[in-house]
Image (tube, coloured by chain):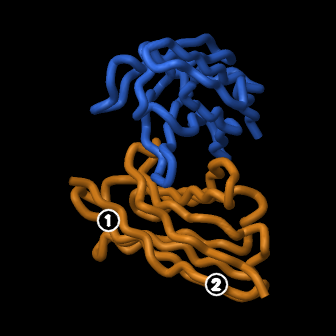
Chain colours: A blue, B orange
Amino acid sequence: DIVLTQAPLSVSVTPGESASISCRSSKSLLSSKGITSLYWYLQKPGKSPQLLIYRMSNLASGVPDRFSGSGSETDFTLKISKVETEDVGVYYCAQFLEYPRTFGGGTKLELK
Amino acid sequence: EVQLVESGGGLVQPGRSMKLSCAASGFTFSNYGMAWVRQAPKKGLEWVAYISYDGGSTYYRDPVKGRFTISRDNAKSTLYLQMDSLRSEDTATYYCTTPPFDYWGQGVMVTVSS
């Protein structure tokens, strides 16, 4: 199975500042079709997860452009610029290259 | 508006069975693969199973293979998860979702305990 390792486990950010979350894969997520199958989700407290970023760097519909995704074949970063109170929650990366689909362990974002 | 509404959860004894349902609306259900993702209390997300748009292909995570069965009724726009031989480690909130998990239901809690 592909293992996704997120860091840090938690991050505390002052509103208006930026935050970055890392996700490292045990295997390249670049498919033969040239698609990098890494996705990012946010689970706000008490809510279902929501898709933020698809295929490493594409913003999902309705997601503010404060969120951005980047990376290589095995190392990925979610950046949140100008963090707002509504960004609080747990962030997960996930891979869709192969079965079983796997998630990272999650990174909790809190406000200072 | 896409809606996914799970039902069928609750308390069940170890070794018993339970069947979850997910009623879909707001999109052409029969055109899309579907999946179940679960989350144990205070834990992270865990993919459970996937079924193709026509039910012709299914995939499961290893610990549930042979115990869980994902199925669908396209005429009713409903996804199912039949869970047999339940274990305490299956205790979780189960979410119905559309790969690549862009839409999610509200989740249904399954508690396996004697």
Q: Which numbered disc covers residue B24?
A: 1
For the C terminus of chain A, which image quadrant?
A: top right
Q: How much space separates mark 2 and mark 1, taking CA atoms?
A: 24 Å
Q: Residue at x 76, y 58 (%)?
A: B62
- Determine if residue A95 is in view: no
Q: Position of residue A56 (x, y in %)?
A: 51, 21
Viewer-side residue, A77 vs B84? A77
Q: Residue at x 22, y 58 (%)?
A: B26
Viewer-side residue, B10 vs B65? B10
Q: Residue at x 62, y 52 (%)?
A: B47
Question: Disc 2 designates what residue?
Answer: B11
- Chain under numbered label 2: B
Residue at the front extreme?
A112
Q: Position of residue B89 (x, y in %)?
A: 78, 67
Q: Of the residues shown, which amino acid type is indicated by label 1?
A: Ala
Q: Badge 2 local density, few (<14 within 10 Å), some, or many (20+)?
A: few
In screen coordinates, is B104 left or right of A61?
Answer: right
Q: Residue at x 42, y 53 (%)?
A: B104
In screen coordinates, is A10 left or right of A20?
Answer: right
Q: Nearer the viewer, mark 2 or mark 1?
A: 2
- Mark 1 lies on a secondary structure that is strand
Q: Please tell me whether residue B40 is drawn above or below residue A82 in the rendered image.
A: below
